[in-house]
Image (cartoon, rainbow, N blue to C red):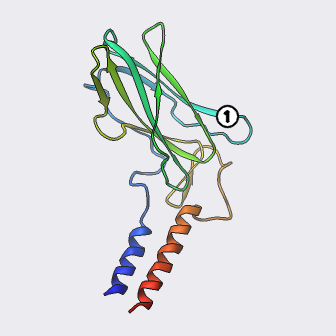
Amino acid sequence: MRRMWALLLVCLVSLPVSASQGGENESISLDGTGIETLYFDEVMRTNDGRSDYADFGVILMMEDDSNISNIRWITQVCINSGICLPPQESTMDKGDDGSFAHRLDTEPGYSYINWKFVIEMENGSESHIPDAGFGWRVWSDCWFDNGTWGGSETYCQEEDSALPGFTVSMVMASMAMAALMARRD
């Protein structure tokens, strides 16, 4: 019985980390959100060693921004090994034309960025777009997802390794755990 549990554990840990289709940008509909237009970079440029930094930006216009005091942009970047860093919060800059904009510095190894907005009203209320989770995802110019390299650039690809380090470590740890569990029988 323990051998079956050990094998099941190894199989579960070996499953892909990402449930989405790698390399495909995702976005929610703007209908009913109060956002009139949303512009964002179609690809997240990462630092490829040829420049000091790279960035990713969004610009949004609200349908009626008269009572909006602030918009927070909640971002989460995920790295090539499939691990997502903790969400980061930024206050968007309000332009003279009523637009809200912000840019995020990106680093090497980011595979994609997820984001959402929190709209703060002058009366203290706030609304989350979307209500739960992240509504948008944009992939970088060089990414790794579930054994596949992609993007318009190749500078991040490692030819020597078929799997990123974290996945290899998890598989090795799972196999060691399974072997120890099987020996206990």
- Point 54% across, 36% down: residue: 43
Residue 124 % position (x, y)? 29, 19
Against 91, residue 18 (above or below) is below
Residue 103 % position (x, y)? 54, 27
Badge 1 marks a residue whose secondary structure is: loop
Against 150, residue 124 (above or below) is above
Residue 118 % position (x, y)? 35, 27
> Which amino acid, by three-letter code, is at mark 1?
Tyr
Is residue 149 toward the left or the right of residue 120 in the image?
A: right
- Point 42% across, 68% down: residue: 13
Residue 61 % position (x, y)? 39, 17
> For the residue carrying disc 1, how many other residues have a C-alpha within 10 Å: few (<14), some (14-19), or many (20+)?
some
Is residue 51 toward the left or the right of residue 122 in the image?
A: right
Along the line of sight, the residue nearer the viewer: 11 or 124:
124
Is residue 119 toward the left or the right of residue 167 in the image?
A: left
- Point 38% across, 69% down: residue: 12
Against 40, residue 99 (above or below) is above
Question: Which of the 4 image quarters holds residue 28?
Answer: top left
Q: Which residue is mark 1?
A: 53
